[in-house]
Image (cartoon, rainbow, N blue to C red):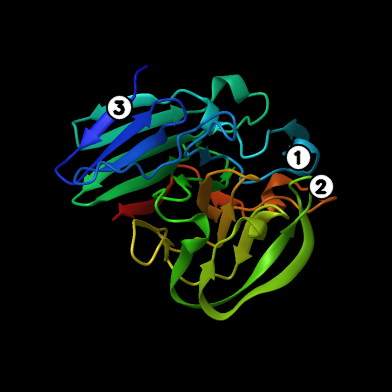
Amino acid sequence: MSHIQLSNKYISASISPKGAELRSLRRADSGREYMWSGDAAHWDRVSPTLFPIVGRLHNDAYTWQGRRYNLPQHGFARDLEFDVVHEDGTCASFLLGSAGPFLERYPQQFQLALTYTLDSEALVLRYDVFNPSNSDDLLFSLGAHPAFRWPLDESFPADAHTLQFERSETADRLEVGTDALLTGRKVPFFRDMDHIKLRADLFRAGAIVLEGVKSDSVVFGTEDGPRVRLTAPNAPWWAFWTMPSGPFLCLEPWHGIADKHGADWDLRGKPGMIALPPGESWSWTLKIEPS
């Protein structure tokens, strides 16, 4: 299915039904593209939704109701076609129901809806998870993974960019091993600071995963050039990631976390899992503001 196009007089967006993935976000006045291109030479995704897990499971496996199942890193929603249930030029909604191809790996009932809405100069993304079961809690995690061009404008060097938090922070970095699992070590990272000066070697050890961030928003960009603000209220974890020599930076607010090395969880006991009772729903909203 072709991409869904949204536009108003300030910004335009393009969303693919595959993964309900944001693929493009542009300013109308400058024509500037803010999203990473998805070049497969580096990383072929742009803004995947992480569901029903965030990060990797130890041995890519978990236990639920006494049985063992396998799931790939970050789950499966990013790889499946969503149904387009609404489209009007400035708003579009996408729906994924209990996923047939993954029922043997995740035998839980769910509905996951993503709604993109242009609101003046911002793109608002709402996630809605519904549990249609009449007997079992729905156990899930959910995270955002949008990748932005780095540098946002080629006239500014990559190391002129910063991440600016809305408040001074004290937060720890969760160490990630080469197997994409947490080592269990927490490394002091923020101590009464409100920004990170970006450079490629910050990511030599993999993603920067921060626990304890109180800010709801972070601004990525340069002092005198283009910027983008991502607002993600109440995210328990924030991650920032790029590949070696990758010309992009991912800003990732998460409701969920990867396993520790050696973990062997029943899904209900896994840190970061949300237990949604039968018949109830859970919602979360992101806002992306390019300037």
Instruction: Report whether 199 appears left or right of 24.
Output: right
Work out whether residue 146 can be spotted. Answer: yes
User: Of callouts 1 and 2, which one flags the residue occurring earlier in the amino acid sequence?
Assistant: 1
Q: Nearer the viewer, mark 2 or mark 3?
A: 3
Q: Nearer the viewer, mark 3 or mark 1?
A: 3
Q: Which of the labelled discs sits on residue 264, or is there none?
A: 2
Spatial CA distance of label 3 from label 1 is: 38 Å
Callout 3 secondary element: strand
User: Of callouts 3 and 1, which one flags the residue occurring earlier in the amino acid sequence?
Assistant: 3
Few, some or many residues within 10 Å of mark 2 (<14, 14–19, 20+): some
Q: Nearer the viewer, mark 1 or mark 2?
A: 2
Residue labelled with disc 1 = 63
Question: What quarter of the picture does the C terminus occupy?
Answer: bottom left
Task: Give the image location of residue 226, x and y in percent.
Answer: 34, 56
- Amino acid type at circle 3 is Ile
Residue labelled with disc 3 = 4
- Amino acid type at circle 2 is Asp
User: Of callouts 2 and 3, which one flags the residue occurring earlier in the amino acid sequence?
Assistant: 3
Q: How many marks?
A: 3
User: Picture quarter containing residue 192?
Assistant: bottom right
Instruction: Report whether 274 appears left or right of 131.
Output: right
Instruction: Report whether 130 appears left or right of 69.
Output: left
Task: Give the image location of residue 95, x and y in percent.
Answer: 39, 30
User: Picture quarter containing residue 236?
Assistant: bottom right
- Amino acid type at circle 1 is Thr
Task: Give the image location of residue 159, x and y in percent.
Answer: 52, 60
Q: In this picture, is 108 found above or below 267?
A: above
